Image (spheres, helix red, strand yellow):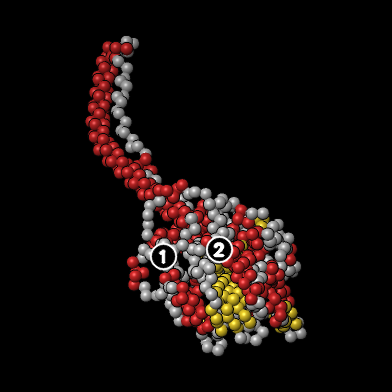
Amino acid sequence: MDLRSGHVGLGAYSGSDFSGGNAFDEAASIHEESTEDMIDSENSLVSGVAQSVRPTAVDSWSLLSANSAARQDEFQPIPGSNESEEIQHLKTESTFNVLDGDAIHHAFMKLEHLSASEGKAVQLNELTDYLIKELLNILKSGISRECPDFFSCMKVPPRQIEAVPERLRKAIKPPTPPTRRAYPVSPEKHWSLTAKGQEKYRLRYQKEVQQINDEYIRCCHTYRQQMANYEIQEKQHLDELKLANEHRSKAEQAEQKRVSERNNVLMSFKHDVASGDGNAVSRYFHYALQLFGFIFEYEDFDIVYSPDSRRLILQYQLPNRDIIPEVRTYRYVKSRNSITQTLFKKQDTKKLYTSVIAQIALLAIVEVFRLDFSNIVDTVCFNGMYLTTDPSTGHTVFPCLISVQANFKEISELNLERVDPVACLKHLSAVVSRDPNEVVPVRPLIKFDKNDSRFVTEENILSDLDQRPNLMELTPAEFESLVTNLFSKMGLDTKLTQPSRDGGVDCIAYDSRPILGGKVVIQAKRYKNTVGVAAVRDLYGTMMNEGASKGILVTTSGYGSASDKFAKNKPLELIDGSGLLSLLKEYAGVEAKIVVPNDWVDSPLYSGEI
């Protein structure tokens, strides 16, 4: 099944299909912006719609449960007790998250106000059991969660422009023209009257006619005044209506411009991501994981992407150990009217926390591939870090408890709904703390370095003022001496051999430590492009021929997924340019940089599949 379209093994995602890296025609008309302005625009864009795009249709308890419907009966209110309403309310609280230690503490504190009773003990046990089940279902819950299309959600819809006031939209009613009242019946028609009667009627008739005519004249005069006022009001009304329409038209044009500019920023950003720009890719995954990632809402994390090796390194702050409840069971003792507690066994706490961080590591890698709409990530390296205090110094430390690296093919072949997370990490050759509960650190497979000092461009005028030595400008002898001194500073007894055919360095070193030590073969390659897998095979063959216990390959560039796959489960260590600069700074005190000259040509000896 295609992981990037939302499916892994039997675990079918409900997310949208992500199309591959087709050309973004919309990006052709994108206006140029500086990098800082672009980042500010992206931050504003994401923060403006972040709350509206987070899944809100399903409460977090449902999201944390892979089979919530099947398990609904386990958490029904206790017969004869209404105290379980506290538990029911907690399960529907949208802000609750089982990876948030403070939220878990608050959940238990909400039950503390209850007096000691059998009902309180039952509720505490309900909550504890539920939390444990949800912690064991983090992976299943995460892969079943909807994963929307980031760029579709981020598109800015036009705001509703205020309509023209209704009073202006309604036409002013003109005054009604006057009408003359009907005259009474003419005297001539009253032939039946006597002469005296006719005279009397004629006088009355003339008077009424005069009244009707006078009344009509007054109405006509009033009508002319009303029409004059109407024409003035009509002109004012039409002027106001025209002004209001012009104002609304300008507002609509301004809104269309705003929407167009912000969506152009988004399309430009999408284009940069699809083209593999390192900074854009790092920012995209940080935004997308923060918005849609199941385990990224409450924890700190950082990302760096290497375009050369197409590797994404994700450094994630693991949740505190207090997400594991200290108490396993509660029991009400009626004779003492108190609740006794049975604490978690140490080995059970260790097993559960190890399972939690293993699920987090696997889910983090899966979610990166799910959000990879243009197939720009071949390999993901996850470093799970734990924020704590060193008891010997009192300083804040950030040790690594888990580190795993996997490529897309390895993850897509897993049936994540049925795997055991810890066993799966072992299958992926991860390094996991032997006791995460006691914060026993491990060495990350790849060291996270966001401030990668390799990336210095020739066009940067400030580079002339940078006094750091450029490793690409050293002579072969100087480079040999640098590498030899570096590993000597790291505690190895090093001896140079003849230079390699591609201009690299062959070095034999000896680690004098008992059991863990032995002979080490070291090769260094000054390359501009990604080192091919042939170089790694060559190192392994040399190591076997020399009878060495370990092989180290150092390069000024990076490695591809084929190299990582070949080195997996072998005594080989691959150090890229960022790692080399970091080691030079840490062990030799050398601040260096890697700037490849325009005329540099890599040796074709190890070109090919990367």
Q: Amino acid at mark 2?
A: Tyr
Res. 427 image quadrant:
bottom right
- Name of the residue lying farthest toward the right: 335
Q: Which residue is mark 1?
A: 597
**SS state under label 2:** helix
Q: Is residue 264 left or right of 240 when viewed as pictured? A: right
- Where is residue 114 shown, x and y percent of the image? 65, 77
Q: Residue at 28% of width from left, 18% of height from top?
A: 201
Q: Nearer the viewer, residue 99 or 544?
A: 544
Which quarter shows the N terminus?
bottom right
For mark 2, does the 10 Å Cα neighbourhood hold few (<14), some (14 to 19), or many (20 or more) residues?
A: some
Q: Nearer the viewer, residue 237 or 603?
A: 603
- Where is residue 288 shown, x and y percent of the image? 53, 60
Q: Nearer the viewer, residue 68 or 367?
A: 367
- Residue 498 visible in the shown view: yes
Q: Amino acid at mark 1?
A: Pro
Q: Which residue is mark 2?
A: 606
Give the vertical position of 379 relative to 208 (above or below).
Answer: below
- Where is residue 10 shown, x and y percent of the image? 70, 57
The reply to whether callout 1 and callout 2 are in contact (CB within 8 Å) is no
Distance between the alpha carbons at the discs numbered 1 and 2: 20 Å
Q: Residue at 30% of width from left, 33% of height from top?
A: 175
Q: Residue at 55% of width from left, 82% of height from top?
A: 494
Give the vertical position of 482 relative to 239 (above or below).
Answer: below
**SS state under label 1:** loop
Q: How many marks are shown on the rendered structure?
A: 2
Q: Residue at 56% of width from left, 83% of height from top?
A: 492
- Where is residue 189 shown, x and y percent of the image? 32, 12
Which quarter shows the C terminus?
bottom right
Give the vertical position of 554 relative to 177 (above or below).
Answer: below
Q: Earlier in the sequence, mark 1 or mark 2?
A: 1
